[in-house]
Amino acid sequence: MPIYALGDAEPTIDPLAFVHPDAVVIGNVTIGPEASVWPTAVLRGDHGKITVGAQTSVQDGTIVHCTSTLDTTIGERCTVGHNVHLEGCIIEDDCLVGSGSVVLHEAIVRSGALVGANALVPNGMEVPGKAMALGVPAKIKEDAVNPELLKYAYEVYVHNSHWYRKDLRLIK
């Protein structure tokens, strides 16, 4: 798996995390225990810092970046769907960021919130806890999230990370 230092900045990956061999992790990136990073995801901590919390999945094709003034933080027990773009934002604990969505600079997705598939959370927007952010640009739907859905989503990927760590093998 391509894990790169950039100058003095080296990724810190918990031994219980799973990083797929086809993911790329560069520079100032911290990945917590039982977190998972899936094929073709790129976490590029070149100008700032990226943090991925425990039991969080960063799924296939997702790009996580930061800037020289804005780190990107993803909390614990989050599900970051396929082909998401996160940059210079904060995703608090227990969130789901739907496939194809974009969360931009200084946006904050509060604990227990959901960003819908293909939504755009623009610069500086705050998604309240337990709310859904839907559409382009995102509109907020208050108190609409079922916490059991979020729990199920992250638990599936914690299970998958253990399974892949144990049984994934290259055959050609």
Image (tube, rainbow, N blue to C red):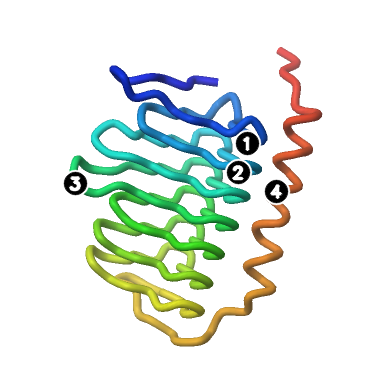
Mark 2 or mark 3: whose residue is earlier in sequence:
2
Q: The N terminus lies in which quarter of the figure?
A: top right
Query: Mark 4, residues whose alpha carbon is within 10 Å: few (<14), some, or many (≥20)?
Result: many
Q: Is residue 3 above or below residue 38?
A: above
Q: Position of residue 144 (x, y in %)?
A: 53, 84
Determine the CA span between mark 4 and mark 2. Answer: 7 Å
- Local secondary structure at mark 2: loop
- Residue shown at 56% from the left, 42% from the top: 32
- Local secondary structure at mark 4: helix
95 relative position to 46: left or right: right
Reading the image, the residue beneath label 2 is: 35
- Residue shown at 69% from the left, 73% from the top: 148
Determine the CA span between mark 4 and mark 1. Answer: 9 Å
Q: Position of residue 4 (x, y in %)?
A: 41, 20
Reading the image, the residue beneath label 4 is: 158
- Local secondary structure at mark 3: loop
Mark 3 or mark 4: whose residue is earlier in sequence:
3
Determine the CA span between mark 2 and mark 3. Answer: 25 Å
152 relative position to 79: left or right: right
Query: Mark 3, residues whose alpha carbon is within 10 Å: few (<14), some, or many (≥20)?
Result: few
Determine the CA span between mark 3 and mark 4. Answer: 31 Å
Which one is in front, 171 or 103? 103
Q: The C terminus lies in which quarter of the figure?
A: top right
**What's under tag 1, amino acid-wise?**
Ala
**What's under tag 4, amino acid-wise?**
Val
**What's under tag 2, amino acid-wise?**
Ala
Mark 2 or mark 1: whose residue is earlier in sequence:
1
Reading the image, the residue beneath label 1 is: 17
Q: Which mark is residue 69?
A: 3
Mark 4 or mark 2: whose residue is earlier in sequence:
2
